[in-house]
Amino acid sequence: MSDRRTGTFEVRLGPPGHGGFCVARHEGRVVFVRHGLPGELVRVRVTEDRGGSFCRADAVEVLEASPDRVQATCPVSGPGGAGCCDFSFATPVAQRALKATVVAEQLRRLAGIERDVLVEPIGSGDAIGGWRTRVRLAVDAHGRAGVHRYRSTDVIADLRCPQPVAGALDGIAARQWTPGADLVIAVDGDGIRHVVELAPPETEPGSRGADRRGPGASGRQAGGRDRRGGAGSGRRDRPHSRGRRGGEWTAADSTRRDDRRAASARRAAAHAARDEWVFEGSGRAVEYVAGRRWEVAATGFWQAHHGAAQRYSDLIAEWSELGPGGRAWDLYSGAGVFAARLAEQAGRTGVVLAVESARPAVADGAAALRDLPWVELRAQRVERWVFEHIGGAAPDVVVLDPPRAGAGKEVIGAVTASGPARIVHVGCDPAAFARDLGLYQAAGYRLTDLRAFDAFPATHHVECLALLRR
């Protein structure tokens, strides 16, 4: 039933799709509906329609509810709201089932793999809040910190999302921040909170004026100077990263639509060097995995879920089957969390080669792994490094943790040509993950194990790890 006066219509929701929606059909078109669950009868309002075979919509009224529906735990992400929590209105068990369905469908469609998938919780299976230790907020034109509206640059100045760990956002809403800036909050392994403001993307490095926030503002530039001290340029390194979480759009991605071109420009600006101002903590977060200590930039990449780095590294250590004298590659290695576990297994007679393009992350890894001299950390693009090493000594195991877009044909071709006995592949995007697994299979490797983790409760995101053998 359609209501032309309100611009709404009723649909019965079908299976979940990759991206936090359910698939429905209306008058011969596909409708991607957010805020609903499979089997529900809902009234929807179209939020995006560019013609063609599909449109996007929000479920604004539930007429027949799923038994898996509960009161939403996130008050910020409902229809018209933020994109932080796609499934906060579903039970934790149902959320994981939705993600498992999506992963299985992507494996079947993109890799020809028929496999049942179980998405496992990290930590308590019923805890869908209080897991996030890294938060990135936007600042609106009035200096208020908030989250982005779904598929929009609008900022919602409402910090009630339940994802962050306790205390992460205390006092943030009460302060005035620089309009257009980003705010990074990290609660590290010692429980210390670090609050760092990143200058607006359009601001030239070193050009921030002391009047941007008015009198009485304070904060140290990341290089150590108090912002009221005037002179001195802040540290302008790019954030430490494994090159993940969102990726970067290329020019080819943004040639057809004006809004895509604008989004590409915004993302490029966001990844450019930006002044950093530390308002709380040191700006250097201490983290621990398997008893080893890292110190990394609070603005850099670390697994958002407080238990994820330990869980993944444990599994990689198990799957690697690396013994004394073994040889391993850790590609897209970040600060070397996986490389450390591999090195401990290989011992002094072994060799671990770790490759990461972000130089600050490599420096942090070198400091954390200084007692493991048989680890060689290289600050280089993986795409270049792997081709330089084809024909060399074959590694026993290769671990890849590529960007959201995946490793791709060229890197996987070079890795498989190097002849490792085992490959461990990590992916945070089910579609890219499935495409990469298909490439391994085409090169003669077979999938022998797969684990999926609910590393981002209440969202549609899921982390997958695969073990492949020749």
Image (spheres, rainbow, N blue to C red):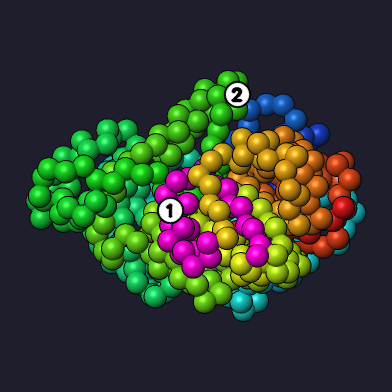
Residue 377: percent from left, percent from top: 53, 52
**x, y percentage for residue 4?**
64, 36
Amino acid type of the residue tagged 1 in the rendering: Ala
Is residue 177 among the parts visible in the rendering?
A: no
Front: mark 1 or 2: 1
Q: Is 88 drawn above or below residue 425 in the view shown?
A: below
The span picked out in magenta is 349-373
**Between residues 262 and 361, which one lies in front from this camera angle?**
361
Residue position for label 2: 252
Q: Would you say 399 lies left or right of 154 here?
A: right
**Image quadrant in which you'd find residue 388:** top right
Dot 1, how many residues are within 10 Å of its Cα: few (below 14), some (14-19), or many (20+)? Answer: some
Rendering coords of residue 199 (x, y %): 29, 43
Residue closer to the observer: 32 or 135: 135
Q: In the rendered structure, which disc, 1 or 2, sits on the residue that comes first in sequence?
A: 2
Q: 459 or 189: nearer the eye?
A: 189
What residue is drawn where x is 86% and y is 42%? 443
Front one among 28 and 311: 311
Tag 1, which secondary structure? helix
Q: Is residue 381 visible?
A: yes
Measure the C-alpha gap from mark 1 to mark 2.
33 Å
Q: Identity of the amino acid at label 2?
A: Ala
Compared to 401, does 385 lie above or below?
above
Q: Magenta span has 29?
A: no
Residue name at image x 11 percent, y 45 percent: 230
- Which residue carries the number 1 mark? 363
